[in-house]
Image (cartoon, rainbow, N blue to C red):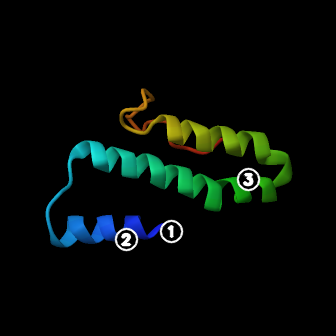
Amino acid sequence: LPIWFVTLRHDVTHGSLPPVEALRIAVDQALLWLHGAYWRPQCLAVGRAHAACLSYAYAALSRTPGAGGDETGEDDAPPE
């Protein structure tokens, strides 16, 4: 986990909120980090469900506020 995530969390918790654009950038970076550190390795580990798993992960990334995706969260169930 990049140290600036920890610093940002500390600042938000014990200080003041940074500009919303900075928070959006942090969310985008956090999702990319999660993808590389957890989602992609997990998808590779499941083998035959790889394509469906990656599709779900990319769909989650596209729902990031400001990314133009579906922000309702209504379709959050993983594919079968």
Q: Which mark is residue 43?
A: 3
Mark 2 or mark 1: whose residue is earlier in sequence: 1
Q: Position of residue 5 (x, y in %)?
A: 39, 64
Q: Comparing marks 3 and 1, which lies closer to the viewer?
A: 1
The residues tagged by marks 2 and 1 sit, at their Cα atoms, a distance apart of 8 Å
Q: Is residue 46 above or below residue 54?
A: below
Q: Position of residue 37 (x, y in %)?
A: 63, 61
Among all residues in the image, which is located at the extreme right?
Answer: 48
Looking at the image, which is closer to me, 8 or 47?
8
Q: Position of residue 68 (x, y in %)?
A: 42, 26
Mark 2 or mark 3: whose residue is earlier in sequence: 2
Q: Does dot 1 land on a helix, a strand or a loop?
A: loop
Q: Which residue, given by chain and number where applicable, does mark 2 sit on?
A: 6
Residue 17: name its quadrant: bottom left
- Judged left or right of residue 44, residue 10 is left
Q: Is residue 69 visible?
A: yes
Among all residues in the image, which is located at the extreme left?
Answer: 16
- Judged left or right of residue 77, residue 30 is left
Residue contact between numbered discs 2 and 1, judged by CB atoms under 8 Å: yes
Name the residue located 78 percent from the left edge and 46 percent from the top edge.
Answer: 50
Mark 2 residue type: Val
Q: Is residue 58 above or below residue 14?
A: above
The residues tagged by marks 2 and 3 sit, at their Cα atoms, a distance apart of 26 Å
The residues tagged by marks 3 and 1 sit, at their Cα atoms, a distance apart of 20 Å
Q: Is residue 80 visible?
A: no
Q: Which mark is residue 1?
A: 1
